[in-house]
Amino acid sequence: MEAEPGTPAAPAVLSPAETDPPAVQLLPGDGAQHHFFRSDLTSVEEHYIRDGARLIGASNGEPYVTWFITDQGIFRRDPKGPGLLRYLPPEPEDGLAWKQRGGDADVWFNLQAVPECHSPLGPTYDACWQLTVLNRQEQTVYVFAPGPAPEGWIGDMTGILDERVDHFADPAQSFVKRRGQAQPAEPPSRAAMLAGAEPWPADMYAPVQPVTLAQFRSEQLRQAAEAGLPVREVDLNGDGAAEALIGRLGEWHADEVWILDSRGNRLRAIHDWLPDSVLGRVDLVTIPGIASPVLIRETGSPAAWHAIAVEWMEGDQFVSPWGWHPKTNLAFGMGYGILPDGAVEITGSLSGYTFVSRYVIERAPGESAFPYLARQLSQEVTPGPHPTTAADLLTALFVARWYGLADQIEGYIPDPAVRAAFMDQDVGRVRYNPIPVRVGRIVEAEYGPRIEPAPPGPDGSIEFMASVQEYEGGSYWTGRAVIGTGEDGRLVVESLEFLDHGWVY
């Protein structure tokens, strides 16, 4: 039973549906097998069996959920608290929100259609269904593919394609679970799944109370703020309705930043697939010439070269310029700046060199596959103090070669014959960001040579590996160099020979 807003309703007992309601088409069929990858790099095998009006799921062989199919909708007993909760109405309806009492707190639900939803197992649907469950400062977002399911274990395209858990109070517990191509596996026995399943409930369920989308969104922001997360509301696309950004902006950290639209729909979860060792930063800026507020996303480490993405909203879509580097919408540097004329400046440093590249963002030609392009206006590579270590000297030498700084090469290799031999060797070119030259001792590994730390030999010789990133994989050069002291007391390369050149994926 469903109460009108503001009208209390009496609890009721669930009874099995005699005929499946339309929402059953969003659930897996009997015997379905689904394979998921998690953002913590683990994988999950899920199996489902149908027992009358119950749909029972097992995760890695252990029963973990039972759905109860009724005329009032599809219920399950929430694992985070007592109570029978309706997770799907009898028939999906775009923009539907409701809440139920689950133990000592309300659990909130929001169901919306998602346009152009892609299934990893096959087609792109005109629409999928997204269910958001808000329960005690934890938000779980499910994306369901429409049915009906084909027969057989492999290739069942219904059920959950994507599950994202946003833990407001402890972001480290947030994770993503994404459906992949199912792999043949021995399913748990039907008897074992039935034995571990929830029996048909004999207790009453709390009334389903309709709420507005605005009320749902307000509750999302309240719970996020209560958990200590910053909440900022900004109109990102100029339509007059404010989007909400939940999470810390303008600082480096390992947590996600979530963007919600005015209906409570999660538009983005920024940095949701980053490993714990990688940091991220999100800035909200303005760029002259772009009407909407702009998000700058940095991923990596603030002390090293890292990826920088620029994006903003047009309508209900995020757009990002391509062209900073080949085949990617990412710039690479250690920082950025926005100039008064709207140019974006990407900066970095390596072994004393400073790098400054300036780009202008402009609409792409009509035949382009991307709506916006970043066109480079200038690039400046400026040397710094003379290197004082073998690693910095060899890195500076290759940087000078990659960027055509002949005077610097002469200072690093004073011997004309050694310098000429170095210049005769093709050492590729930098397409993305310059990579430090590694020095030590060359050892052979399973996927090619690598460098282990080692001091120079008695004659000052040291082995090295220089590399550049290609469109896919990269090229490397190994060699041996003797480092000495020039007449002015500075480090110089006295001899250099290349040993090997190869490509790795």
Image (tube, grey):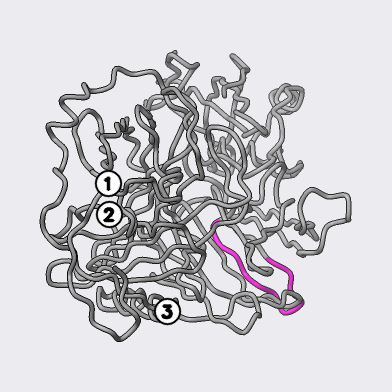
Image spot of residue 434 (x, y percent): 61, 42
N-terminal label among 2 and 1: 1
The label nearer to you, 1 versus 3, is: 1
Q: Secondary structure at mark 1?
A: strand
Instruction: Give the residue type at disc 2.
Output: Phe
Q: Residue at 46% across / 25% down in the picture? A: 151
Residue carrying label 3: 212
Nearer to the camera, 329 or 114: 114
With respect to residue 174, does 189 lie above or below?
Answer: above
Nearer to the camera, 28 or 284: 28
How many numbered discs?
3
- Can I make out residue 409 in this image? no
Please tell me whether residue 339 belongs to the stretch shown in magenta: yes
Residue carrying label 2: 75
Separation of marks 2 and 3 at Cα, in angstroms = 21 Å
Separation of marks 1 and 3 at Cα, in angstroms = 25 Å
N-terminal label among 1 and 3: 1
Q: Is residue 24 left or right of residue 47?
A: right
Residue carrying label 1: 67
With respect to residue 444, does 89 lie above or below?
Answer: below
Q: Secondary structure at mark 2?
A: strand
